[in-house]
């Protein structure tokens, strides 16, 4: 039975982009740039969810599945694997692409060319990308003193059904390593049939799993810095999930949207999540009061107390730490 050890979830980068888009005016000049970046992230996420679906049909090899594992080498340089499959027989790295159009692989100049709506665009060769990930993973395992399987396999998986793949008939690597997503179960089965001998013991698999999860390092990404957005341009207030306005006010221990009339007890939680994504997990009473647009210090203190957050400092100088899930 397969086991998803690191599920396919929205990345922090995606969540931060969504928070910024939610809290910028509809006509904000840089909004299209943020939406374009979010669109790319969403495409990647959709592709990985598609792969996750097809992996359900591989049941005989007790796969340990890790989505979006980002590791750092001894120099501190990071590399990321879209999907890593760990089993006793062979590790497999999947490079996932969710793009449409005519996709051509050029072995002479080692590039990928996409033609869509009459326009041609070049990309780095994903075969080269995934082979580099393989080398870096092997070295990472060596540095961690883990036995290294010499038969680490790699695949490039296209998940968009509107992708048409073409390559030179002599480009052996592309023919054997690049597939459409529906082919994934059959391709993996063939790989495991060729590599039936167990290489890793259960103890070694458990060790690698712990190392991967403990060493995973999410990308540091500040939307405000990346797009040079001043904090003063971010809309403050409590966000209404129903009508998407910021007309929510605190009334008798409840949040009431003056725009649509929705009443909730915990509307502040989503807004504090936005705060964390945009500014980081540290917050004071004054900062909470300002961001949620609360009328008094006392109300802010009650909200902080109800959340039972960890904190440092005395009452007047207290700094609280908001949770931040990857």
Image: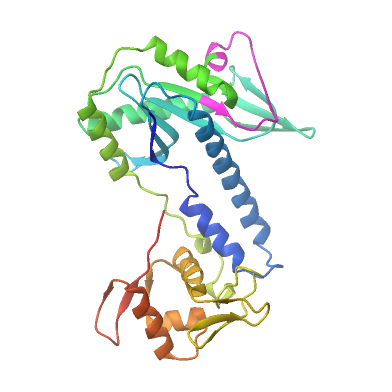
Q: How many marks?
A: 0
- Give me the residue at 52% from left, 64% from top: 224
Residue at the right extreme of this rendering: 118
Foreground residue among 20 and 136: 20
Could you tell whether 294 is left or right of 102 in the image? left
Could you tell whether 35 is left or right of 281 in the image? right
- Give me the residue at 65% from left, 62% from top: 30
- Give me the residue at 29% from left, 84% from top: 317
Pick the quarter of the image with the N terminus: top left
- Give me the residue at 51% from left, 71% from top: 271
Residue 79 image offset from top left, x and y in percent: 40, 38
Could you tell whether 270 is left or right of 70 in the image? right
Could you tell whether 96 is left or right of 114 in the image? left
Residue 125 appearing in the image: no
Residue 194 image offset from top left, x and y in percent: 40, 10
Up the image or down, 90 lies above or below 324; here it is above
Q: Quadrant of residue 45?
A: top right
Residue 324 image offset from top left, x and y in percent: 40, 61
Residue 263 appearing in the image: yes
Residue 49 image offset from top left, x and y in percent: 54, 39
**166 drawn magenta:** yes
Q: Quadrant of residue 179?
A: top right
* Range drawn in magenta: 156-175
Up the image or down, 227 lies above or below 103; here it is below
Up the image or down, 314 lies above or below 190; here it is below
Up the image or down, 135 lies above or below 77; here it is above
Visual colour scheme: rainbow
């Amino acid at each position: 039975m397969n086991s998803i050890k690191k599920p396919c979830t929205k990345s922090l980068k995606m969540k931060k982009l969504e928070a910024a888009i939610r809290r910028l005016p509809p006509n904000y000049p840089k909004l299209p740039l943020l939406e374009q970046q979010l669109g790319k992230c969403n495409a990647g996420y959709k592709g990985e969810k598609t792969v996750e679906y097809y992996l359900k049909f591989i049941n005989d090899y007790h796969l340990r599945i890790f989505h979006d594992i980002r590791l750092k080498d001894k120099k501190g340089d990071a590399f990321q694997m879209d999907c890593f499959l760990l089993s006793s027989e062979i590790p497999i790295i999947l490079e996932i692409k969710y793009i449409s159009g005519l996709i051509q692989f050029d072995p002479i100049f080692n590039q990928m060319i996409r033609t869509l709506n009459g326009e041609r665009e070049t990309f780095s060769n994903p075969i080269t990308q995934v082979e580099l990930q393989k080398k870096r993973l092997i070295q990472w395992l060596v540095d961690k003193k883990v036995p290294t399987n010499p038969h680490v396999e790699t695949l490039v998986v296209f998940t968009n059904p509107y992708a048409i793949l073409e390559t030179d008939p002599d480009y052996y690597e592309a023919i054997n390593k690049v597939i459409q997503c529906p082919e994934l179960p059959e391709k993996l089965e063939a790989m495991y049939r060729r590599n039936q001998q167990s290489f890793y013991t259960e103890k070694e698999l458990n060790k690698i799993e712990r190392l991967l999860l403990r060493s995973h390092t999410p990308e540091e990404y500040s939307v405000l810095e990346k797009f040079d957005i001043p904090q003063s341009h971010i809309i403050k207030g409590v966000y209404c999930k129903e009508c998407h306005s910021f007309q929510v006010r605190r009334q008798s221990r409840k949040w009431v949207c003056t725009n649509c009339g929705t009443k909730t007890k915990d509307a502040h939680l989503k807004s504090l999540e936005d705060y964390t994504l945009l500014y980081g997990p540290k917050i004071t009473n004054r900062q909470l009061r300002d961001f949620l647009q609360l009328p008094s210090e006392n109300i802010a203190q009650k909200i902080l107390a109800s959340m039972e957050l960890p904190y440092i400092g005395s009452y007047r100088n207290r700094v609280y730490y908001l949770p931040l899930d990857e």
